[in-house]
Image: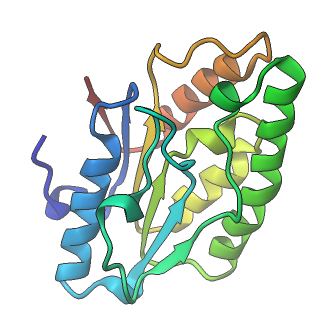
Amino acid sequence: MALKLDKVLGKKVLIAGDTGTGKTMLLVKLLEEAIMRGLSSEVTLIELAPKKIGEFGGRVTDYLRNISGTRLLVPTDVFAPRLSGKMKEEVLLLAEKNREAIEPLLKKFLGKPTRLLFINDLTIYLHAGDPELLEKCIKVSETFVGTAYYGTKLQYDKGSGITLRERMLTEKIMKKVDEVIFLE
């Protein structure tokens, strides 16, 4: 999909889809365009995607090396709970560890927001995090572009309930943005 920065400036946009549909690549292209336009100092990228596990995952920095001038907020460790957790308790523990690592980054953004906010894989936070904190970040930015897992390939959550929570909260956020772009 060819989406240009002009189409998202001043809007709140969520890019949603299953794994491997190109969500991160579309975010990369928009971020790259913002950097090329000289908007780096007005951009925050909150990178929440775990490191690639097989065909799953992928970070913006895997594809876009030069993000100098942009504010990059990345948790020290971020896990893929459904893929890494061996049983229900471990999946929930990993989701909680993600929440603990991500929450300070969202609060840091709120303390010093930028005009443009890009969040890769915001659904990682929704497994255990406070959706209202995420919504505040979206609201305070003039332009928001985020990616969200919204599919079926990662449904099995070992009985933890994070898949249902993720889906419900993603749908809640979809109602709060100006546009949802579904990738297949």
* Residue 9 showing in the rendered view: no
Q: Where is residue 163 in the image (x, y as percent from the top left)?
A: 65, 19
Does the image show residue 133?
Answer: yes
Query: In this picture, is 58 found above or below 47?
Result: above
Q: Which of 139 and 161 is in front in this view?
A: 161
Q: At x 57% / y 48%, what residue is drawn?
A: 50
User: In this orientation, which residue lies closer to the viewer: 51 or 24?
Assistant: 51
**Left or right: 61, with 80 as reference point:** left
Please indicate whether residue 80 sits to the left or right of residue 58 in the image.
Answer: right
Instruction: Give the total of numbered labels.
Output: 0
Residue extending farthest front? 54
Name the quarter where the N terminus is drawn.
top left
Q: Which of 128 and 131 is in front in this view?
A: 128
Write the residue at 79% across / 38% down: 94
Picture quarter with the C terminus: top left
Tell me residue 48's x, y (percent): 57, 53
Please report the residue visible at 25 percent of the width from the left and 49 percent of the height from the top. Answer: 26
Q: Nearer the viewer, residue 179 or 96?
A: 96
Q: In which quarter of the image is residue 32?
A: bottom left
Q: Which residue is drawn at 15% across and 63% down?
A: 6
**Scheme of image coloration:** rainbow
